[in-house]
Amino acid sequence: MRKEMLLPAAAVALLYLVLALLRQAGVIGIYWGQIVDLALITTIQAVGLSLIYGFAGQFSLGHAAFYGLGAYVAAFITRTQGGTPLTFALALLAGAAVAGIVALIIGLPILRLRSDYLGIATLGFGIIVKVMLDNADKLSPVLGGARGMAGIPRLTTFHWVFWLAVLTILIARNLVNSSHGRSCIAVREDEVAADIMGIDTTQFKTLAFVMGCAMAGLAGGLYAHLYSFLHPSSFDFLKSFDVLLVVVLGGLGSLTGTVVTSIGWVFLLEGLRDVLGQQFLDWRWVVYALILIAVMIARPQGLMGGKELSLDMLLRRRAARGGADHGAA
Amino acid sequence: MLQVQDLRVAYGNIQALHGISLSVAEGEIVTLIGANGAGKSTTLRAISGLVRPRAGKIVFQGQDITRTPAHKIVAMGVGHVPEGRKIFTEMTVQENLELGAYIADPKRFHEDLNAVFERFPRLRERRRQSASTLSGGEQQMLALGRALMLRPKLLLLDEPSMGLSPRLVQEIFEIIVELNRSGTTILLVEQNAAMALSIAHRAYVLETGRVVLDGPAQDLQNHPAVKAAYLGGGQSANG
């Protein structure tokens, strides 16, 4: 078991070193550096929704609201308590915790029910959060309300984002591969059948929902301290669809699919900005919709479709291509 | 072992059960027969906690389980093979059986898995295969095997013959009799009344949410009303 972990761990460390060095040397400039950070933040957020929708099968339309909650809570703490690394760490933790607790409060009554009530409830919740953020200046002037919250210390660095993304993926992976994860998958496949296996379906739906929303909250805190400015429109309920699309495109029930797609998605949007030029910027949404349609026609199960990508698999495939004629299918 | 008293269940405004009372003694095979919509499946679903009754009482081994959540009822020893089998089609045969043992003692896992494979050799052959590739009969065996992983004291079987060829129906019913002989009490819901009555000790006839007739299965087999309605005087009523 330990030995199998060595290779991926080395690969992650190598990736970190290469990216960090490239940034240090200026090969990846400030602009693209921020895009890398944003891609990793999107990954954290999307992995959260992947747990909720991809693995536990619970349709949530309010992911951006939990992302926003985490962002505002974390930003409020560093704005009022000062921007030291310690307050930053606590602020991120608080953002994740608040998102998780709110998810628990919403989830407990709703997740007892079967079917798609969660989708409706989270949709409503997303709109409530947006209205609350728009009027948050009445609560505390620091929050800025509809004008946006400015002056957040720029504390999010590549190191924070990278390792927190790795941590999130690890937590999600361990959950998915545990018997808890199996239970979540059973709930997604057939809730009645899961019930009669003796699985406490409410408990596992709630577990996935709370963990997933806490991850969104964490991502929100990182986002707030990356751009140092927050605006309620960034957490509009339409933004929840973006994450949902990433998870669906990556393939439901595939963590690696979610990771690859979230990074690819952020880079695609930015890449199109370059390709299309300033005048045609809005055409990005057309191109992006076309890609979506094409993928859904070509691969309705999503890019990975419930399969996981692993180093082991890639290496074995290369070995199979080189040597024996009976592939490692 | 199981007593159901005046059970009433409604889905929204539609009342499915208008006060059903029945009992199952340890070691028995009891069958519920009746037409579509008579409330047979709903009765089983209420017993295993999948639907909440409006009124009435369900007692299993002296304990009131009327309001107990489904997963706890399973843990008490009530296995349920639902209508339409409800196997996990995206998982392999073995993974389905592992989930069946989800709340069982892990130390017993291999013993129980082997017991299921002994009873259903076909499942052993296909243990690594995706459950979606199984034939209807094999899926029914998997659903049965999955329920057996918990060594249930009472097994609720919902239409095990549905969609199976006559030869497979025969096979499944032989397995049910065998299970019963080895000590499992069985409550069987069937549309195939002739088959069900031929293996059951006692039977209840349900009509639109009420018990209209009950008694030893042999008596019901010869009861004129049952014959006319469910056993088909000629060939007309055979499902």
Image (cartoon, coloured by chain):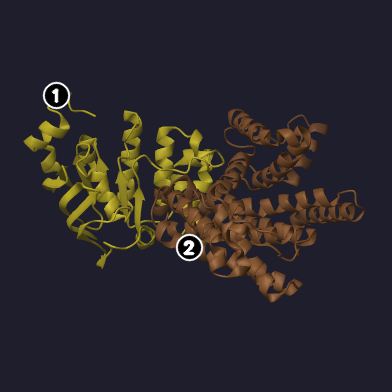
Chain colours: A brown, B yellow
Could you tell me which quadrant the C terminus of chain A lies in? top right
Query: Residue visible at 63% across and 30% down?
Result: A290
User: Which residue does the numbered mark 1 point to in the structure image?
Assistant: B234
Query: Residue visible at 60% across and 37% down?
Result: A302
- Hey, which residue is sitting farthest bottom in the picture? A81
Q: Does A72 appear above or below B92?
A: below
Query: Residue visible at 85% across and 56% down?
Result: A20
Out of A214 and B53, give the one closest to the viewer. Answer: A214
Report the side of A149 relative to A21 (left or right): left
As measured in the structure, the alpha-carbon distance from the residue carrying label 2 to the one carrying label 1 is 50 Å
Out of B52 and B237, give the one closest to the viewer. Answer: B52
Q: Is residue B111 visible?
A: no
Helix, strand or loop under label 2: loop
Q: Where in the figure is residue B229, as x and y percent of width and height?
A: 13, 33
Q: Where in the figure is residue A12, as x and y percent of width and height?
A: 79, 54
Residue B105: mark in rendering: 2
Kind of residue indicated by mark 2: Asp
Mark nearer the N terminus (2 vs 1): 2
- Hey, which residue is sitting farthest left in the picture? B224
Q: Which quadrant of the view contains residue A218?
A: bottom right
